[in-house]
Image (cartoon, rainbow, N blue to C red):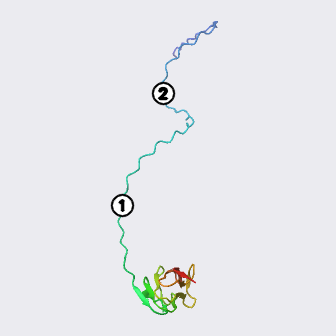
Amino acid sequence: MSDVTTNVTTHKAVDVGTLGPTGPTGDTGAASIIAGPTGPTGDKGDTGDKGDTGAKGDTGTKGDTGDISALSINGQTGDYTLVIADAGKWIDMDSSSPQTLTIPKNSVVAFAVGTMILIRQAGSGTITIAPVDGDVTIEDKDGLVTLGQQAVATLFKVATDTWVAFGALGV
């Protein structure tokens, strides 16, 4: 068996006396790797100056030029019912007697929606624009009779059997 020696120090109670002044602060220790809590968000700062305008984009390609051609004139001297060949034409109605221009229903003459037809009262006889048998609607503001010699009106197809009439028209 080995011998084990134990040293025991005995302390005796000593009167300590009064505490002296605090000594100087020591140096700051090394930074910690443990992050502390995030502080509150500060007030929003002023908006900065506006930036410069960006570069101008390229100009697009030029579109095709539309077909600009003279209107064909269809001269009439009496009552007349429109035909498909009248689409986009000038109907020149020349008579000293009153005349009727009739718009046929779509099932008989299928003008495309968007078709425009111009009408001129060339003579002294007024022109009354009329739908065929009430199957065609003609919307107008002031009437469907031309206002006198040289009056011009336009017919514009807006739906299957619906046209709009405008221009020098009255009742």
Q: Earlier in the sequence, mark 2 or mark 1?
A: 2
Residue closer to the observer: 94 or 26: 94
On the image, numbered disc 1 is attached to which residue? 59
Contact, CB < 8 Å: mark 2 with mark 1? Answer: no
Q: Quadrant of residue 70?
A: bottom left
- Identify the residue shown where x is 36% and y is 72%: 65
Query: Looking at the image, which is closer to me, 48 or 89?
Result: 89
Can residue 103 be spotted in the picture?
Answer: no
Q: Amino acid at mark 2?
A: Ala
Q: SS at mark 1?
A: loop
- Number of other residues with Cα within 10 Å of mark 1, as a class: few under 14, some 14 to 19, many 20 or more: few
Q: Which mark is residue 72?
A: none
Residue 78: % across, % down: 48, 93
Horizontal and vertical percent position of residue 6: 55, 13
Which image quarter is the C terminus in?
bottom right
Residue at (48%, 27%) from the top-left corner? 31
Secondary element at tag 2: loop
Residue at 40% x, 86% y is 73
Q: Which residue is mark 2?
A: 31
Q: Is residue 56 above or below residue 115?
A: above
Q: Is residue 136 above or below residue 51?
A: below
Mark 2 vs mark 1: give the one in front: 1
Residue 85 visible in image: yes
> What residue do we see at 54% from left, 90% from top?
132
Q: Using a 10 Å C-alpha cutoff, classify the residue at mark 2 as few (fewer than 14 neighbours), some (14 to 19) or many (20 or more).
A: few
Please give left or right for residue 18 compared with residue 77 in the image.
right
Residue 90: give x, y in percent of width and height. Answer: 43, 84
Q: Amino acid at mark 1?
A: Thr
61 up-or-down from 50: above or below: below
